Image (cartoon, helix red, strand yellow):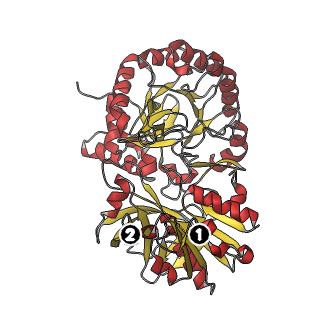
C-alpha cells in the first residue's frame, strides 16, 4: 500500500510501475469467440501502462441498468500495437453490453489491478484453464515464450465450443484439452488427462477457471508436491481493496481477492482438498 | 477556494465533500486516482475495539441502481489502526475522521477514548447502526433511548467533534436525531444503508451469506434527501448528508435539503476520482449562480 514507486519510461510518457490508472481506452476490435464470449481489443492514445499476466481491469459499463464496473482478466498485451485484450464471457446485462461495443467506441477502464502470477523461477510450467478461465493464461504464456520457455497448456470445457481461442494458444505453446462430452481432446476433467500421469515433470502450475476445477487442480498439485497458483474470481465492487466485498478466507484471515489476489498460491488458501 | 469552505461546529472543512466510511478504505487506496488532500474529509473505515473478520463471502449483491453489502465491519481493531494506519495517513492535508463502531457501549467508549488521543483526528463518526449484543442484537440506533445511551457514554470521554451516523431503518429519524442532539452530539450524518435483501431465484437461495444487507447507491437517494430535509427542520446541529450521491448536482440537492456537508459512498466504486469531480462541480455551480459561499446553499430549498 505504501511502497515506493518505481518510474518506468515507455516512449513519451512516464508511468509508475503498478500504479493504477483510470483511462479512456478506444475499441479497436470486438469479435465473438465461440457462442458466448467476446474478444475485446482496446488501445490508447498514449502507450498503455505496465501490466502483469494475471492482473485484471475494471471496465465501466455505460448503461443505466448496470451500476458497478465489471472486473475482467487481462487476456493479452501487445506492446507493438499498443493494445490490451479482454476475453469476456457473456453472462448478464453488463457483459452483454461490453460485447456490443463497436470499433471506435470509448471505454473507461481502471488498470492494472491486483497481483499477477509469480512465474519468475518456473522453467517447465503447466497452465491449466477451464472455460473462460483460459483468459489470463495467454498473456502468461506469452511471457514464458518471450523468455524462450515453451509453456504447456491444458484446457477443459463442457464441449468443444467451450474451448476458447485454441489457435492463439497453439501459437504460444503445446496445447492439450479435455471435454466432458469427449467432443474434443480427452473425455473427462483436466485432472484426468493423460498428461498428468507422469505428473512430476512440471515445476509449477498456474490455473484459472471454475472453483471446483481449481480445487481439483490444487489437490493434484498438493499430492504431487508441485507449486501451484490459482486465479480466483469473486464478486467485486471497487477492485482496489476499499469495499472489502470480494474476500477469500486465507491463512491471513479474510483478504480482498482484488488487492491480495486475484492470484493466490494454494498454500495460502484454506481449501479443504 | 474560499467559497467552498464550510464547518461542522468547530471542524473546519476546505469543502463539503467527504468520503463515506467503508467505501474509501483509509484513503490511500485512492491516491493513484486523484490528490486525496483535495477532499473536505476522509471517513476511514469502521473501526472497532477488537479485530473483526467480518462476514463470510458473498458479501455483495448488485441491485437496480444500487448494491447490497454485508461486510460486517471487517477491520483489524483500533490498536492496529493507531500503530499502523494512523502514522501513514495523519499528514494528509484533510480531515481524517474515524468511524467508530461497537457491539456494546463499553467498546464504543474505549475506542473513542483511544481515538481522542490522536492529534490529527479532529472528529469521530459514531456508527450506531451496529447490533447491541447485550440487548438481543437490536441496533443501538433504532430507538431514541438506545441511540441516546451510547452517545451520552461516548460524549463523556470524547471532547472533539462528535458526529453521529443515523440509521434510516426507523419509523421517525427525527426522533433519533433529537435524542442524540440532546446528549451533546455536534452533528448527525445520514443516512446509513437501508436494510434490504436479494434472492437468486434459480438457486432459491439468498445472494448474501447473511441473507440481508445494507442497500446503498442511487436507489436510496430520494429516501436520504427526504430524511435530511425532515431532520434539518427538527434539529439545530449541522447535518452531513449521505445516500446515493454520484454527481455534484446530487451533492447540491443534499445541501439545499439542509446538509452542511456530504459524504460520497458507492460512487467511489464506479469512478475512483468522482469526489474530485464533485468538488469542482460544486465550485462551478457557485460560479454559475453567483453564490458567494457554499454555506448559502444549506437548507436553501425554495418551497
Does residue B141 appear left or right of residue B80 in this picture? left
- For residue A12, above or below residue B282: below
Is residue A8 visible in the rendered image? The answer is: no
For the residue carrying disc 1, how many other residues have a C-alpha within 10 Å: few (<14), some (14-19), or many (20+)? many
* Coordinates of residue B176 in the picture (x, y in percent): 47, 17
Q: Quadrant of residue A210?
A: bottom right
Residue pictured at 64% horizontal, 63% vertical? A217
| Residue B55 numbered mark, or none | none
* Coordinates of residue B199 in the picture (x, y in percent): 43, 37
Q: Which residue is mark 2?
A: A34
Looking at this rendering, what residue extends furthest in the top direction? B145
Does residue B158 appear left or right of residue B30 in this picture? right
Q: Quadrant of the C terminus of chain B?
A: top left
Q: Quadrant of residue B221?
A: top left
In three-dimensional space, the C-alpha distance between marks 2 and 1, rounded to whole angstroms, equals: 19 Å
Of mark 2 and mark 1, the one earlier in the sequence is 2
Q: Which residue is mark 1?
A: A128
Amino acid at each position: 500500500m505504501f511502497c515506493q514507486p518505481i518510474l518506468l519510461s515507455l516512449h513519451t510518457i512516464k508511468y509508475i510501475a503498478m500504479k493504477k490508472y483510470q483511462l479512456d481506452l478506444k475499441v479497436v476490435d470486438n469479435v465473438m469467440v465461440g457462442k458466448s464470449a467476446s474478444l475485446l481489443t482496446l488501445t490508447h492514445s498514449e502507450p498503455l501502462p505496465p501490466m502483469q499476466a494475471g492482473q485484471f481491469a475494471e471496465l465501466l459499463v455505460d448503461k443505466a441498468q448496470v451500476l458497478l464496473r465489471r472486473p475482467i482478466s487481462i487476456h493479452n498485451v501487445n506492446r507493438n500495437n499498443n493494445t490490451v485484450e479482454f476475453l469476456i464471457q457473456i453472462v448478464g446485462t453488463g457483459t452483454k453490453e461490453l460485447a456490443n461495443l463497436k470499433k471506435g467506441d470509448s471505454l473507461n477502464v481502471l488498470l492494472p489491478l491486483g497481483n499477477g502470477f509469480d512465474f519468475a523461477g518456473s522453467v517447465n510450467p503447466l497452465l491449466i484453464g477451464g472455460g473462460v478461465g483460459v483468459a489470463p493464461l495467454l498473456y502468461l504464456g506469452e511471457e514464458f515464450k518471450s523468455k524462450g520457455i515453451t509453456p504447456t497448456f491444458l484446457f477443459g470445457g463442457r464441449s468443444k465450443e467451450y474451448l476458447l481461442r485454441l489457435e492463439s494458444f497453439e501459437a504460444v505453446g503445446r496445447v492439450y484439452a479435455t471435454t466432458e462430452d469427449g467432443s474434443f481432446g480427452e473425455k473427462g476433467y483436466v485432472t484426468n488427462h493423460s498428461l498428468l500421469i507422469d505428473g512430476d515433470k512440471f515445476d509449477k502450475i498456474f490455473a484459472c477457471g471454475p472453483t471446483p476445477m481449481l480445487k481439483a487442480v490444487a489437490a493434484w498439485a498438493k499430492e504431487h508436491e508441485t507449486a501451484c497458483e490459482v486465479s480466483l474470481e469473486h464478486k467485486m465492487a471497487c477492485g482496489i481493496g476499499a469495499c472489502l466485498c470480494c474476500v477469500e478466507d486465507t491463512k491471513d484471515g479474510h483478504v480482498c481477492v482484488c488487492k491480495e489476489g486475484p492470484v493466490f498460491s494454494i498454500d495460502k488458501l484454506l481449501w479443504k482438498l | 477556494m474560499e467559497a467552498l469552505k464550510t464547518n461542522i461546529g468547530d471542524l473546519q472543512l476546505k469543502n463539503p465533500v467527504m468520503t463515506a466510511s467503508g467505501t474509501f478504505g483509509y484513503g490511500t487506496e485512492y491516491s493513484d486516482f486523484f490528490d486525496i488532500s483535495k477532499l473536505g474529509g476522509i471517513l476511514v473505515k469502521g473501526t472497532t475495539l477488537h479485530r473483526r473478520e467480518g462476514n463470510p463471502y458473498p458479501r455483495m449483491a448488485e441491485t437496480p441502481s444500487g448494491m447490497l453489502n454485508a461486510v460486517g465491519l471487517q477491520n483489524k481493531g483500533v490498536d492496529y489502526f493507531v500503530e499502523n494506519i494512523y502514522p501513514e495517513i495523519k499528514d494528509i492535508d484533510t480531515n481524517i475522521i474515524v468511524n467508530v463502531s461497537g457491539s456494546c457501549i463499553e467498546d464504543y467508549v474505549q475506542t473513542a477514548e483511544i481515538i481522542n488521543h490522536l492529534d490529527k483526528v479532529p472528529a469521530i463518526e459514531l456508527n450506531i447502526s451496529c447490533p447491541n449484543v447485550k440487548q438481543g442484537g437490536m441496533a443501538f440506533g433504532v430507538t431514541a433511548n438506545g441511540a441516546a445511551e451510547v452517545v451520552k457514554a461516548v460524549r463523556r470521554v470524547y471532547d472533539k467533534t462528535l458526529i453521529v451516523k443515523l440509521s434510516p431503518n426507523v419509523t421517525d429519524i427525527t426522533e433519533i436525531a433529537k435524542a442524540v442532539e440532546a446528549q451533546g452530539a455536534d452533528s448527525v450524518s445520514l443516512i446509513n444503508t437501508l436494510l434490504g435483501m436479494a434472492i437468486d431465484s434459480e438457486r432459491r437461495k439468498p445472494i448474501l451469506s447473511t441473507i440481508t444487507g445494507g442497500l446503498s447507491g442511487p436507489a436510496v437517494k430520494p429516501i436520504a434527501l427526504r430524511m435530511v430535509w425532515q431532520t434539518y427542520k427538527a434539529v439545530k446541529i449541522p447535518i452531513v448528508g449521505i445516500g446515493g450521491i454520484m454527481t455534484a448536482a446530487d451533492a447540491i440537492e443534499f445541501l439545499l435539503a439542509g446538509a452542511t456537508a456530504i459524504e460520497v459512498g458507492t460512487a467511489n466504486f464506479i469512478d475512483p476520482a468522482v469526489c474530485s469531480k464533485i468538488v469542482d462541480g460544486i465550485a462551478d455551480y457557485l460560479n454559475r449562480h453567483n453564490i458567494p459561499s457554499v454555506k448559502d446553499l444549506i437548507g436553501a430549498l425554495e418551497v
